[in-house]
Amino acid sequence: MKIREFLETQQHTLVACRRADTLQSAAMLLHSNHIGAMPVLDVDGKLVGILSERDIVSAISQRPQQLMQLRVGDIMSAPPVTCTEDDDMCDAMRVMLSHKFRHLPIVNAVGELRGMLSIRDCLAMQLRDKELEANVLRDSFIAARYS
């Protein structure tokens, strides 16, 4: 399945932050929206990075004295690795696995942010496909048995 098709089925609002945001405000956004990562956008809305729970934990462990002064731009992962809406869900999963990411920004052909994909989304899609395949095989077996 193409990522575009998957994103069209989702009802989620895309939550993002800016480089100048404080870590506290970014952490509150992650927590209140029950998400593990979010895109970081510049003032023009262009994707410049991604902020994840891992980035925050790393900052806490490596720079505890500076936490109150740190901004999203100080700890975000940049430049962001992305996939396009025209890629397959399996391609996105391979990218996440090879980079050890759990979240991946999705862009369109001109590089505009279209959404975020999680490893959970990919696993849910694989499970759905496997269940469909099992149902087709079961129905084929039953049909062959009674014909």
Image: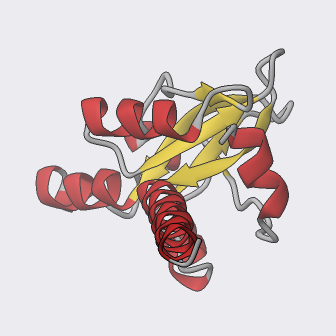
Residue 134 in percent (x, y) is at 45, 67
Identify the residue shown where x is 72% and y is 30%. 107
Answer with left or right where residue 144 lies relative to residue 47.
left
Q: Quadrant of the C terminus?
A: bottom right
Q: Quadrant of the N terminus?
A: top right
Residue 100 in percent (x, y) is at 25, 40
**Splitting the image into 4 quarters, where does residue 85 fall?**
top right
Image height of 98 relative to 70, above or below: above
Image height of 120 relative to 97, above or below: below
Identify the residue shown where x is 49% and y is 54%. 122
Front one among 8 and 12: 8
**Splitting the image into 4 quarters, where does residue 8 fall?**
bottom right
Identify the residue shown where x is 53% and y is 72%. 135
Answer with left or right where residue 101 lies relative to residue 116.
left
Q: Residue furthest front?
A: 147
Identify the residue shown where x is 48% and y is 30%. 91
Front one among 17 and 145: 145
Residue 99 in percent (x, y) is at 29, 31
Residue 93 in percent (x, y) is at 42, 40
Front one among 12 and 70: 12
Image height of 82 relative to 27, above or below: above
Q: Residue furthest bottom?
A: 32
Image height of 33 relative to 119, above or below: below
